[in-house]
Image (spheres, grey):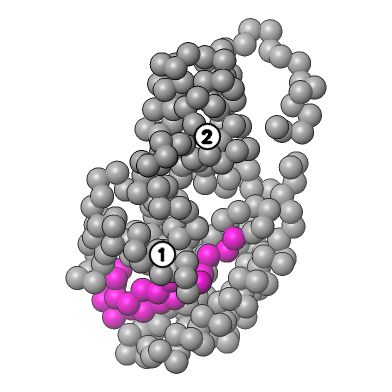
Amino acid sequence: MQPGAEDQVAPRYPLESVDRTLLLLRLLADRREVSLAEVREHLGVGQSTAHRLLAMFVYRGFAVQDPVSRRYRPGPAFADLGRAAGADLDLAGVVRPVLVSLAAETAETVHLGELVRTDVRYVDVIESASTLRVASRVGQTRDAHATSVGKAMLATRDDDAVRAAYPGGVLPARTPRTLTDVDALLAELRRVRSRGYARNRGEVEPGVCSVGVAIVHPDRGLLGGLSVATPEARWSTALEREHVAALRTAVAAVVEAIPAATGG
């Protein structure tokens, strides 16, 4: 329960339907997984009312239902709430000096991105000084499933949440190498979780390779991600390893520089 919530005075003209919605949001946030019966008991409503409310939560992305256990978990829309709650944090300001160091170490184009539903929005960039380089994408968006930083951030969600974010199961192809169905994406995200970083080899733009790592704060959760992008002509397995090591150091520095969330 939110600290101090029990001390708040109820509004003079409460809206019961709104109150139930907010109570369900809090329940999902606190327990992370609930059954229909638990929702019914917690809200003090009948089976059909609880079912309709949960159906709307699934429809709007605030919940996903496990197809086997039939239990409900927070959906991808919770990430949007988390970004709003973290509005006290100037992430770009915190990351900028780390981005400068990362660019100097790798001599390649480095980006800070954030996940917006199924897209990556590029917030900041330092472009390589090389004549042959990957151009800045700052201010632009790209499909998360086609980018390294996008896949790194998607991998922080569980499979049910990712599947719910792509209800049709079909992903747009940007190049012949782009993953085009959600099952292939889920398989790739499992590999991302296993190795701790994501890669992109010409999946969003021909001739561009990149590696990305998510920025996950122990208190604030997913905040964004960092990537290093290289022209395919310069890419090698050894170079990828070097860039991944630099990214991990950079992400650790960002997380260490970010204070705990206020008001929690």
User: What residue appears at the point 53 percent right and 39 percent down from the top-left corner?
Assistant: 33
Q: Which structural element holds mark 1?
A: helix
User: What residue appears at the point 33 percent right and 85 percent down from the top-left corner?
Assistant: 232
Between 171 and 86, the one lying in front of the other is: 171
Residue 15 % position (x, y): 57, 12
The amino acid sitting under disc 2 is Val
Residue 237 % position (x, y): 40, 89
Between 204 and 167, the one lying in front of the other is: 167
State how far apart marks 1 and 2 are (Cα): 24 Å
Q: Earlier in the sequence, mark 1 or mark 2?
A: 2
Residue 143 % position (x, y): 34, 59
Residue 105 appears in the rendering? yes
Q: Counting other residues with Cα less than 10 Å from the Cα at mark 2, is it few (<14), some (14-19), or many (20 or more)?
A: some
Of badges 1 and 2, the one in the foreground is 2
User: What residue appears at the point 36 percent right and 41 percent down from the top-left corner?
Assistant: 67
**Residue at the left extreme?**
176
User: Residues in magenta?
Assistant: 196-216
The amino acid sitting under disc 1 is Arg
Q: Say which quadrant the N terminus sits in.
A: top right
Residue 239 position (above or below residue 164): below
Q: Main secondary structure of the magenta part?
A: strand
Residue 4 position (above or below residue 85): above
Q: Which mark is residue 190?
A: 1
Q: Which mark is residue 58?
A: none
Residue bearing the label numbered 2: 34
Q: Which structural element holds mark 2?
A: loop
- Residue 150 highlighted magenta (yes or no): no
Residue 128 position (above or below residue 257): below
Q: Counting other residues with Cα less than 10 Å from the Cα at mark 1, is it few (<14), some (14-19), or many (20 or more)?
A: some
The number of discs equals: 2
Q: Image quarter for residue 264?
A: top right
Residue 226 % position (x, y): 52, 69
